[in-house]
Amino acid sequence: MDDPTGGCALTPASGLQDPSGPSGPLIPDGLDATLVLVRHGESAFIAEGRFQGQAESPLTAVGRRQAALVGARLAAPHDPPALPVPAGPPTELVHSPLGRATETAEAIEAALVAAGTPTPRRADPGFLEIGQGAWQGLHRTEIAERYGAELAAWRRTPVEAWAPGGESLPEIATRVRPALAAVFVPLAAGRARGTHDRPQVPGYRDAVPDHPWSIVIGHDGVFKIVLLTLFDLPLERFWMWSMDLCGISVVELRAGRPVLRAHDLTAHLVGLDDAPSRQAADDRAADGAL
């Protein structure tokens, strides 16, 4: 493919220095692509008010319905109101290997197949939820009673405190980085370098972008780290992001520069929205449960 800017084409590893390691450029230089992040649907532990971390907890009936709805949305992304994603099918579906994320990914895969756009799917342990150690499976009230000081520290200074026996934020960031690098490789393969010398402000009836995109299905906690990593923000900002169940976030890469196009979209779930559900979601966010 010719590069309209006169530069060389991207290669799968362009811009990546040791993509399996924690240092070096993460996003291939000049990459035009879009990354869609989707949190899994409601699980049994979430419905019961339990911290789950890396514990297995299947989707509830509500969670399966959420997964079907987000799948339908992603299978027809340009139906109004259009999602800010490129034309054409996604390059791949990448998901956490935990059951609740796998079930959600399978629902999205099924919707894409039904729409005539079958998409390769793979699991990557780099997108596992944050390990919550001793807190996994416990009800949030029990954690507050037994680990009150640790829980308070986790909510206030998450880089300095975390669940007993769980993962620290630096540990998670270390495994997230190569997982993201692996997502970028097929997006960069054979592509010409993009340029910043084009309109950067949306709303001018620009054409739908003509570049590749992929979908990652994972968890609220690990997606906080994904976003901090993409935007090169310190881990101390961990609590600045939040994602609702089956919420959609969209990050566009413009010549290698990340741009947040949408965050935590949930309009596709409106049929499931009610006051008790909203209150439960607010309570979970306040608890610091993952």
Image: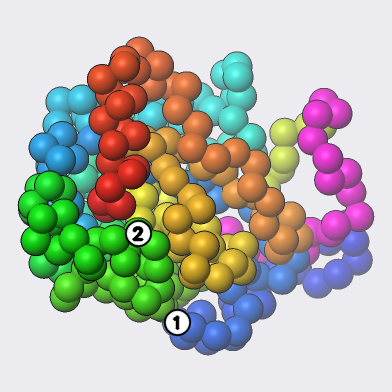
Residue 244 on image: x %, y %: 38, 37
Residue 40 visible? The answer is: no
Considering depth in this image, is 168 or 22 the residue closer to the camera?
168
Residue at 85% from the left image edge and 29% from the top image edge:
204
Q: Callout 1, which amino acid?
A: Ser
Residue 194 visible? The answer is: yes
Q: Callout 2, which amino acid?
A: Arg
In the displayed structure image, the side of residue 128 where residue 198 appears, left or right = right
Helix, strand or loop: magenta stretch? loop
In the displayed structure image, the side of residue 228 where residue 40 appears, left or right = left
Q: Label 1's element? A: loop
Residue interval drawn in magenta: 187-205
Question: Which residue is label 1 attached to?
Answer: 20
The verdict on residue 198 being magenta is yes
Residue 194 on image: x %, y %: 79, 59
Dot 1 alpha-carbon crowd within 10 angstroms: few under 14, some 14 to 19, many 20 or more: some
In 3D space, how far apart are the residues under numbered discs 1 and 2 (Cα atoms)? 30 Å
Considering depth in this image, is 207 or 143 the residue closer to the camera?
143
Residue at 29% from the left image edge and 61% from the top image edge:
152
Residue at 16% from the left image edge and 54% from the top image edge:
144
Residue 38 on image: x %, y %: 41, 43
The verdict on residue 154 being magenta is no
Screen quadrant of the N terminus: bottom right
In the displayed structure image, the side of residue 190 where residue 95 appears, left or right = left
Considering depth in this image, is 183 or 70 the residue closer to the camera?
70
User: Looking at the image, is 3 positioned above or below residue 171?
Assistant: above
Question: Which residue is label 2 attached to?
Answer: 155
Give the total of numbered labels.
2
Dot 2 alpha-carbon crowd within 10 angstroms: few under 14, some 14 to 19, many 20 or more: some
Considering depth in this image, is 83 or 224 the residue closer to the camera?
224
N-term-proximal mark, 1 vs 2: 1
